[in-house]
Image (cartoon, rainbow, N blue to C red):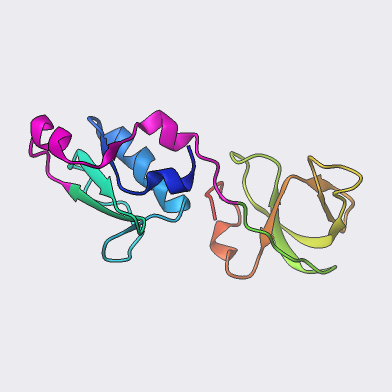
Amino acid sequence: MTVEDLKNTKIYLSEEAERFKFQDKVFKLGVKWKDGTVETKHIKNCFYFINNDLQMTMDECSGVHWFLSKRNKQIFLDDVLEIEEPKKEYEFKPLDKVLVRDNTSDKWLPRLYSWNSHEANESYPYEITSGDLYKYCIPYEGNEHLAGTSEMP
C-alpha cells in the first residue's frame, strides 16, 4: 500500500489506541483534517474517511451498516501502518548544527555535522565532527524542541 492508495478510503477502528496510531501515521504521510490541521483529535469516533485530496473526516459511529454503505474503498490499520513514510532529504554543510540518532527509539543528540559518509557506510551515512556515524540526521534549526527526546520530526 502507498500514500496514493489512501485516496477515497474508509476505515473502522474499534479501539482508541488504534485511532491514535492511525492518525499519527496518516499525518506523517501527508493526510490532513478537512480544516487543514494535523493534530490528533476525534478519538471517540470510530469511522474515518480520506478523500481524493488526502483530507480526512470522521463520523461518530453511526453504525456498521451505514459505514459499509459508503462507496469508499475500505482499508485496514495494519496496511496503513506498513506504508513507508517519505524521507526528507536535507543538504548539510560542514559544521552545520544537526540532531542525530541511530534508532527511532533513541533520543536526538545535538552535534556538528562533518560530512556524508554514504559511500563508506550506507547504513550510517552521517558523520559528525567527532568521527561518529549516525543513521538519522536532521537540521537542529527548527527542530530544537526535539533535542533529548525520541519524538519524530
> What is the x, y in percent for residue 148?
60, 52
> What is the x, y in percent for residue 69?
13, 36
- Write down the quadrant of residue 11 in the picture: top left
| Depth check, front residue: 109 or 34 | 34
- Write down the quadrant of residue 88 in the picture: bottom right
7 over 123 or under it: above or below: below
- Write down the quadrant of residue 146 in the picture: bottom right
* Residue at the image position 25 percent from the left and 30 percent from the top: 15
**Horizontally, is 56 left or right of 59 in the view?**
right
Residue 74 part of the magenta-drawn span? yes
* Residue at the image position 59 percent from the left and 39 percent from the top: 105
Q: Which residues are magenta?
A: 59-86
> What is the x, y in percent for residue 59?
15, 46
135 over 98 or under it: above or below: above
Residue 120 part of the magenta-drawn span? no
> What is the x, y in percent for residue 144?
59, 65
Q: Is residue 62 visible?
A: yes
